[in-house]
Amino acid sequence: QQQVKQSPQSLIVQKGGISIINCAYENTAFDYFPWYQQFPGKGPALLIAIRPDVSEKKEGRFTISFNKSAKQFSLHIMDSQPGDSATYFCAASRPSEYGNKLVFGAGTILRVKS
Amino acid sequence: DGGITQSPKYLFRKEGQNVTLSCEQNLNHDAMYWYRQDPGQGLRLIYYSQIVNDFQKGDIAEGYSVSREKKESFPLTVTSAQKNPTAFYLCASSPGLSSYEQYFGPGTRLTVT
């Protein structure tokens, strides 16, 4: 059962354009929403994260928009660069008896054309 | 140089053999995790551990086993009972299970033929 749905599966953007990746969740117990960036053959790296009490968080060219009522959040990459070409994963953390665990979306392969 | 190391980067095994993947961290993190990554499916949690000598099953624990004898080490054994073991395996750590951030190692690609 996929608890975090991510779209699109792949995305091609021109250099300088805006890349937008969307995620939706069902479980209202989720209380932390990170985005990870993964280059081929490497482990994912934490990019940016948001809590549900904030509607937007910006770090450099990366922005998370969060809509609690719609149970959706998105990653915006401004001025996209070829070096941003990677797979991006959204995730959500759910509390459990043994601490917080991450549930990941299926990933979006981003290609930025120069 | 702090971080998470996984070895080897590539591993090949014959079907029916058990294989152990290494994960070591020198970040002094309490919590450690193992994930499996398959194309188009994101990361799925196999096992996780909060403290030494304690670990919990994740969402896809069948066919896998772990141990946590030292804080720094969390090896994963892929047993012959795992029906489809070929995948990219990722180890992660976190300061503690009350912490939200997880930091990943470089991964081990296991191929079973």
Image: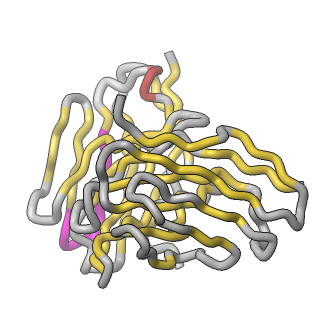
Residue A97 part of the magenta segment: no
Region of the chain picked out in magenta, as a range: A67-76
Q: Residue furthest left?
A: A53
| Rendered view: B6 above or below A83 | below
- Secondary structure mostly taken by the magenta-highlighted segment of the chain: strand
Seen in the image, is A58 located left or right of residue B73?
left
Query: Where residue B87 appears, x then y in whole percent?
Result: 70, 55
Task: Choose between A46 and A24: the one closer to the eye.
Answer: A46
| Residue sitting at x 43%, y 59% | B70
Total marks drawn?
0
| Residue sitting at x 53%, y 79% | A1
Residue A70 part of the magenta segment: yes
Seen in the image, is B61 located left or right of residue A91?
right
Task: Choose between A67 and A96: the one closer to the eye.
Answer: A96
Seen in the image, is B66 located left or right of residue B51?
right
Task: Choose between B78 and A80: the one closer to the eye.
Answer: B78
Q: Quadrant of residue A48?
A: top left
Task: Choose between B45 and B69: the one closer to the eye.
Answer: B69
Seen in the image, is A92 located left or right of residue A42?
left
Is residue A110 in view? no
